[in-house]
């Protein structure tokens, strides 16, 4: 489902694409004085508008300056940093974005994403820019969120593997070495613990964290809320790598089983929270199945001197054939109706993979006609007086 953002709107009175984002505070010193909440809200509006313009042929972000300065001020470090992260480059912000202030108004000129400076690895540049891929992988003992370039590489690899698997399915099954599931079953020492029904409080597990093992310990009463929020990242990371085990109730430094105290958590409702969170995670297939994430949750009783102390919860995740997202990727566009909307997962993957010439047949139907951002089109703003024209020329 697409999400609309009503706090930023396309200005229908302008001949070119102009997005009004309302009041924004400019200037490093002014922004530092803002409450964090307000600073984040303003930043979110500007970055969403910039993302939508980059993905929709370029345009202008119009803001009312909330600060009182009579003279032009810089944008502010946090805004610049957020825009740099959006374009995935540390030093060419001005190649895409330039800011111009006039009286109480500020105009941020945004180029088309496809018009950026060619880089030596431009073939790996995604066709759209995104605020988050929502794709995670394991890297040694860490969970990392893939940046859009890494996400594109990952999607290409998964697509190649899916094709490979499809070809393999046509050949006799005896020729396919089935090694993939061994990671999360018998060969993994975590499997032994996963099989057990009870364990002693303070027991030190005989294996460390690894690419396929993560230990978590929550000592608060808000375990459920924390699990609900964080578990999609771990599940996505394990499923997109080689599968693995998430232990909830183990101290990661000492590998000690501490469990979740029974006063703090109801194991049935925690299992429901885990199942609910995983069921909401989007998946994308290049292969011909419509499989969901395959996982199993185990609740192991933790005893302290013969008495039930609490629970160790283990989630075993199988490796996934294609791509598992923690939530829908975050990327904004301006649609045909001039609404600013976020792409859903299918649209996002289709746009990301757009450069690929040999799209699978079923995949083509996902592409919508406005898929390819139009070439950078001339953008100007009628109310901006004469001297600024040179900047527009310079930019567009
Ligand atoms: Zn698949």
Image: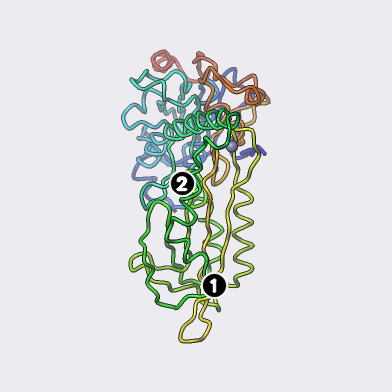
- Splitting the image into four quadrants, where does ligand 1 fall? top right
Residue 77's spot in the image, x, y percent?
35, 40
Residue appearing at x 41%, y 39% in the figure: 82
Residue appearing at x 54%, y 39% in the figure: 323
Corner quadrant of residue 257: bottom left
Q: Secondary structure at mark 1?
A: loop
Q: Is residue 365 above or below residue 200?
A: above
User: Which residue carries the number 1 mark?
Assistant: 197
**Mark 1 vs ligand 1: CB under 8 Å?**
no
Q: Which mark is residue 242?
A: 2
Q: Residues within 10 Å of mark 2 (few under 14, many from 20)?
A: many
Residue 104's spot in the image, x, y percent?
47, 33
Which quarter of the rendered picture does the C terminus lie within?
A: top left
* Residue placed most toward the observer, 131 or 377: 131
Residue 308's spot in the image, x, y percent?
53, 82
Q: Which mark is residue 170?
A: none
Residue 52's spot in the image, x, y percent?
54, 30
Mark positioned earlier in the residue sequence (1 or 2):
1
Q: How many marks?
A: 2
The scheme the figure's colours follow is rainbow
């Amino acid at each position: 489902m697409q999400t609309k953002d009503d706090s930023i709107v396309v200005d229908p009175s302008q001949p070119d694409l102009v997005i009004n984002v309302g009041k924004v505070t400019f200037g490093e010193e002014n922004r530092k004085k803002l409450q964090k909440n307000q600073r984040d809200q303003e930043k979110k509006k500007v970055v969403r508008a910039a993302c939508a313009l980059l993905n929709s042929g370029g345009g202008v972000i119009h803001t009312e300056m909330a600060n009182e300065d009579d003279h032009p001020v810089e944008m502010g470090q946090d805004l610049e940093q957020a825009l740099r992260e959006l374009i995935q480059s540390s030093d060419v912000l001005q190649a895409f974005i330039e800011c111009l202030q006039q009286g109480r108004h500020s105009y941020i000129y945004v180029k088309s994403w496809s018009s950026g400076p060619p880089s030596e690895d431009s073939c790996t540049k995604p066709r759209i820019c995104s605020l988050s891929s929502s794709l995670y992988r394991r890297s040694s003992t860490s969970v990392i969120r893939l940046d859009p370039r890494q996400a594109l590489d990952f999607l290409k690899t998964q697509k190649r593997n899916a094709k490979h698997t499809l070809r393999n399915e046509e050949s006799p099954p005896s020729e396919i070495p089935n090694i993939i599931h061994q990671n999360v079953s018998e060969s993994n020492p975590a499997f032994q613990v996963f099989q057990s029904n009870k364990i002693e409080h303070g027991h030190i597990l005989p294996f460390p964290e690894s690419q396929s093992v993560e230990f978590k310990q929550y000592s608060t009463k808000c375990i459920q809320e924390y699990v609900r929020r964080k578990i999609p990242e771990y599940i996505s990371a394990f499923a997109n790598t080689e599968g693995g085990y998430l232990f909830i109730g183990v101290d990661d430094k000492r590998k000690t089983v501490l469990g979740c105290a029974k006063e703090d958590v109801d194991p049935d409702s925690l299992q429901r929270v885990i199942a609910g969170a995983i069921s909401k995670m989007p998946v994308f297939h290049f292969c011909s199945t419509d499989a969901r994430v395959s996982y199993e949750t185990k609740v192991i009783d933790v005893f302290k001197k013969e008495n039930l102390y609490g629970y160790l919860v283990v989630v075993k995740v199988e490796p996934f054939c294609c791509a598992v997202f923690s939530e829908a990727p975050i990327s904004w566009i301006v649609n045909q109706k001039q609404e600013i909307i976020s792409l859903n997962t299918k649209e996002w993957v289709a746009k990301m993979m757009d450069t690929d010439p040999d799209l699978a047949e079923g995949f083509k139907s996902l592409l919508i006609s406005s898929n390819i951002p139009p070439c950078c089109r001339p953008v100007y703003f009628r109310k901006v007086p004469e001297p600024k024209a040179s900047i527009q020329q310079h930019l567009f």
